[in-house]
Image (tube, helix red, strand yellow):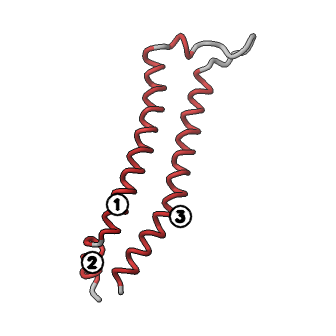
Amino acid sequence: MKDEDIVERISKNPKFMQFVRMRNNYAIVLSILMIIVYFGYIGLIAFDKSFLAIKIGAGYVTSIGIPMGIGVLVFTIVITAIYVRRANNEFDAIKDEIVREASK
């Protein structure tokens, strides 16, 4: 079977279309969450520096902005790990099934 035939069969498969929609929706949701967190932090830097300058506890040098910035970095790593885990488990299994069906 030619590769072109397989590609055409995959692109016409309703499971493939559903898979693309599901994967794109998931990526959009995670992207929106990341945008909210990132631009929320940048917005605080731009518009409420006094909040970020609040010292943590009595006598400490660290302000609340430092842990929040670290939180943005940690959130980025976590959200990436969530996507990678789902991509490696669920998305790859669905993709393999679609390719297997098209290769018959």
For numbered disc 1, what is the local secondary structure?
helix
State the residue position of label 3: 89
Amino acid type for the residue under numbered disc 2: Arg
User: Which residue is rendered at x = 28% and y = 76% of the image?
Assistant: 7
Q: Position of residue 100 (x, y in %)?
A: 40, 80
Dot 2 crowding, Cα within 10 Å, few <14, some 14–19, many 20+: some
Q: Which numbered disc covers residue 20?
A: 1
User: Which residue is rendered at x = 45% and y = 38% of the image?
Assistant: 33
Dot 3 crowding, Cα within 10 Å, few <14, some 14–19, many 20+: few
Residue 55 vs 30, above or below: the answer is above
State the residue position of label 2: 9
Q: Residue furthest right?
A: 59
Quadrant containing the C terminus is bottom left
Residue 98 vs 89, above or below: the answer is below
How far apart marks 2 and 3 lie (CA) works out to: 24 Å
**In the depicted view, which residue is nearer to us: 23 or 58?**
23
**In the depicted view, which residue is nearer to us: 53 or 23?**
23
37 left or right, relative to 70: left
4 left or right, relative to 52: left
Q: Position of residue 18 (x, y in %)?
A: 34, 62
